Image: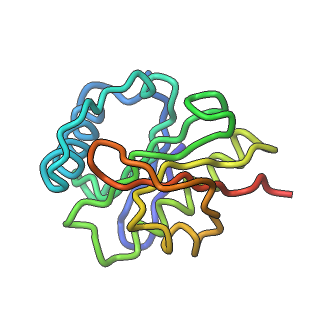
Amino acid sequence: MATGDETGDRWEALPFEALGVHRLYDILALRQAVFVVEQDCPYLDCDGLDAAAWHLFCRRGQTLLAYQRCLPPGTPYRESSIGRIIVPEAGRGLGLGRELVRRGIAFNRERWPGHAIRIGAQARLTAFYESLGFSVDGDSYDEDGIAHIHMTLPAAD
């Protein structure tokens, strides 16, 4: 599934098997650049969930500007999930973070109707996710040295 817009951005959602080695390389490189290097958080990114995920991303030309993975219910939560949500420095300030999460919500609701969406958000982004309809669901916890919080978006009516 792919769509374009007036900026020339191309949005795609692909299952793991359809990514191909070049897209997969770009995605893993972006995740390492932001989560490991920029946020100074060494952790094992390859967590065994990528094969079950749909990978939703935005490219402008060959540049990856936004990425997230959408996971079905049961991987890892009872609800569906979005995660590994990234907008690299080159894409920041363009509204892509909000658009990315909005598209992830729409994708999950269409693909897994009747299921809530659960995220493990960085705690510093709580207000951002609340502005998109998520509610805090539990206490703050430490994940790889960064404060996180579980948040849930109810299933659509």
Whether residue 58 is visible, yes or no, is no
Q: Residue at x 72, y 48 (%)?
A: 116
Q: Determine which quarter of the picture holds residue 157.
A: bottom right
Q: Residue furthest right?
A: 157
Which residue sits at x=29%, y=33%? Answer: 45
Q: Depth check: 128 or 27 in front? A: 128
Image quarter where the N terminus lies is top right
User: In this view of the protein, can residue 12 be seen by the observer?
Assistant: yes
Relative to 29, say whether 9 is above or below.
below
- 9 versus 68 height, above or below: below
**Is 114 on the left-hand or right-hand side of 112?**
right
Which is nearer the eye, 146 or 128? 146
Percent across and percent down for residue 65 are 29, 58
Residue 79 x %, y %: 68, 39
**What kind of colouring is applied to the model shown?**
rainbow
Q: Nearer the viewer, residue 141 or 4?
A: 141
Instruction: Give the residue drawn at x 17%, y 39%.
Output: 42
**Number of numbered discs on residues:** 0
Q: Is residue 110 left or right of residue 37?
A: right
Q: In the image, 65: left or right of 13?
A: left
**Residue beneath the point at 19% across and 55% down:** 39
Residue 144 screen position, x and y as percent: 29, 42
- Specify the quadrant of the image occupied by residue 71: top right
Residue 155: x %, y % from top left = 77, 52
